[in-house]
Image: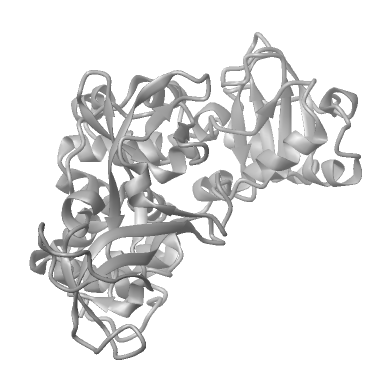
């Protein structure tokens, strides 16, 4: 991905080609989706609207984009081909922001407060948190007319102009989201748990898929089921895709079998496959508890490559604690499992060292039918925060992490008890005001 200092003007992205990692073109950019925020804060970029070969327009989240360089967009190769539908709280930059008449927010060298300008372009930049936001506005002063000379153009900070209002029907949930935007998922889950069902549904509708998925994973099962049931089925499938497969499987196991199968059918096959595998195991076994997305590399990979994977911001700490070394393929279920390399070992070795030379193959992995008591004693005995799960053919199926184990050894209502232990922000009424 381009660095935090690189700024990209959105007009340059229009009709830009989108490629998968193999170099095959999958479509072209048609618009940019952002979430406007209150208080003059720069909008957060959610993703692209991409027109694929069939002329269908689909949504490409920013976390599936690996590069915006050289006049092209490079993706991770995984694109949901479901038709794009704009949701509450979302704004299309090219369709809704450009050519809009806005006003200067304050008097200064560029003009008087309230002076009207026309938006010609906006620019986005990547923040230190590896998110993208709109930070600059390219505007023209004076009335625009075809036969008149071009007016003065300026590049201003987003906060220097006003008039990018959120739609009135979204203000209630949007104000609430703006208030709690910086909360951790567990703390936002706390807030949602104490809202009325109506307000909770409004907030869930306004959250983007990734954020809602993160929050859902922190909620009691009853709240998860209620929120999922309040979403349109296609949106519910999108949120399940954004959840960790083990959490999605846990949630689907709480639904009626026919309802669960209907949602699995709506999910992308590649996203549904690991969830189906997890649902095939008993709940309190290694197979039922594991995540299917551990860090897996081949023995020929270097320590530098392994550390780059460990640095990925979206990884949970327990997942980043060790790298699993397998013969190809490296997607679960993998090729032959060879062993693992702990994060601390990676820090002690030269970057060019091959993982095959330092792999620890002495520790026996767990089988998928290993029951919970044996898993907890395994982690405690070997002082580990995650353990590999391998099938009878020595293929790595996934890894059981300590947070998943804790979810199942604590009392069933521990999440609800924790949420009732105190609000993240005192003084918030049940309707969010």
Decide if residue 289 is on the left or right side of residue 104: right
Q: Nearer the viewer, residue 353 or 54?
A: 54
| Residue 12, percent from left and from top | 37, 45
Q: Position of residue 280 (x, y in %)?
A: 42, 21
Q: Quadrant of residue 309?
A: top right
Residue 84 in view: yes
Residue placed at 50% from the left, 20% from the top? Answer: 23
Residue sitting nearer the eye, 27 or 349 = 27
- Residue 306: name its quadrant: top right
Q: How is the image coloured?
A: one colour
Residue appearing at x 8%, y 65% in the figure: 169
Please identify the quarter of the rendering in which residue 153 is found: bottom left
- Give the percent coordinates (x, y) of residue 129: 54, 60
Looking at the rendered image, the quarter that the N terminus falls into is top right
Q: Quadrant of the C terminus?
A: bottom left
Camera-nearest residue between 375 and 314? 314
Q: Which residue appears farthest toward the top when viewing the image?
A: 393
Number of numbered discs overlaid on the protein picture: 0
- Please provide percent x and percent y for residue 368: 58, 23
Residue 232 lies, with reference to residue 158, above or below; the image says above
The answer to whether any part of residue 195 appears in the image is no
Please name the residue shown 61% across and 42% down the image: 401
When the figure is inspected, residue 359 is found, relative to residue 7, above or below; the finding is above
Q: Is residue 101 above or below residue 374?
A: below
Q: State the residue at coordinates (78%, 44%).
A: 343
């Amino acid at each position: 991905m381009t660095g935090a200092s690189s700024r990209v003007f959105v007009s340059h992205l229009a009709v830009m080609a989108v490629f998968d990692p193999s170099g095959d073109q999958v479509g072209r950019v048609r618009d940019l989706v952002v979430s406007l925020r209150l208080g003059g804060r720069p909008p957060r970029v959610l993703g692209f609207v991409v027109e694929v070969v069939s002329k269908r327009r689909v949504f490409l989240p920013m976390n599936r984009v690996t590069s915006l360089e050289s006049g092209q967009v490079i993706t991770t190769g995984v694109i949901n081909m479901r038709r794009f539908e704009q949701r509450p709280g979302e704004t299309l930059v090219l369709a809704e922001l450009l050519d809009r008449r806005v006003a200067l927010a304050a008097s200064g060298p560029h003009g008087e407060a309230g002076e009207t300008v026309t938006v010609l372009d906006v620019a986005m930049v990547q923040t230190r948190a590896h998110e993208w936001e709109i930070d600059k506005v390219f505007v023209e002063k004076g009335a625009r007319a075809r036969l008149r000379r071009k007016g003065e153009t300026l590049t201003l900070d987003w906060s220097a102009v006003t008039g990018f209002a959120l739609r009135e029907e979204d203000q209630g949930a949007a104000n609430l989201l703006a208030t709690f935007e910086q909360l951790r998922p567990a703390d936002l889950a706390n807030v949602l748990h104490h809202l009325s069902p109506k307000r909770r549904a409004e907030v869930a509708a306004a959250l983007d898929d990734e954020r809602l998925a993160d929050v859902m994973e922190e909620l009691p099962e009853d709240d998860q089921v209620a929120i999922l049931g309040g979403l349109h089925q296609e949106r519910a499938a999108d949120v399940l895709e954004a959840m960790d497969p083990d959490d999605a499987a846990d949630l689907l196991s709480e639904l009626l079998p026919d309802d669960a199968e209907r949602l699995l059918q709506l999910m992308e096959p590649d996203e549904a496959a690991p969830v189906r595998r997890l649902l095939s195991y008993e709940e309190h076994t290694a197979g039922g508890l594991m995540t299917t997305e551990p860090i897996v590399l081949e023995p020929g990979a270097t320590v530098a490559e392994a550390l780059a994977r460990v640095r990925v911001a979206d990884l949970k700490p327990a997942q980043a604690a060790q790298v699993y070394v397998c013969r190809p393929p490296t997607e679960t279920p993998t090729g032959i499992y060879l062993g693992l390399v702990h994060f601390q070992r990676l820090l002690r070795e030269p970057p060019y060292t091959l993982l095959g030379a330092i792999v620890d193959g002495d520790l026996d992995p767990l089988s998928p039918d290993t029951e919970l008591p044996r898993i907890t004693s395994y982690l405690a005995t070997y002082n580990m925060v995650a353990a590999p799960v391998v099938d009878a053919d020595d293929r790595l199926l996934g890894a059981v992490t300590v947070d998943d184990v804790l979810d199942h050894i604590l009392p069933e209502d521990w999440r609800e008890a924790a949420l009732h232990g105190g609000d993240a922000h005192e003084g918030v009424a049940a309707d969010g005001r």
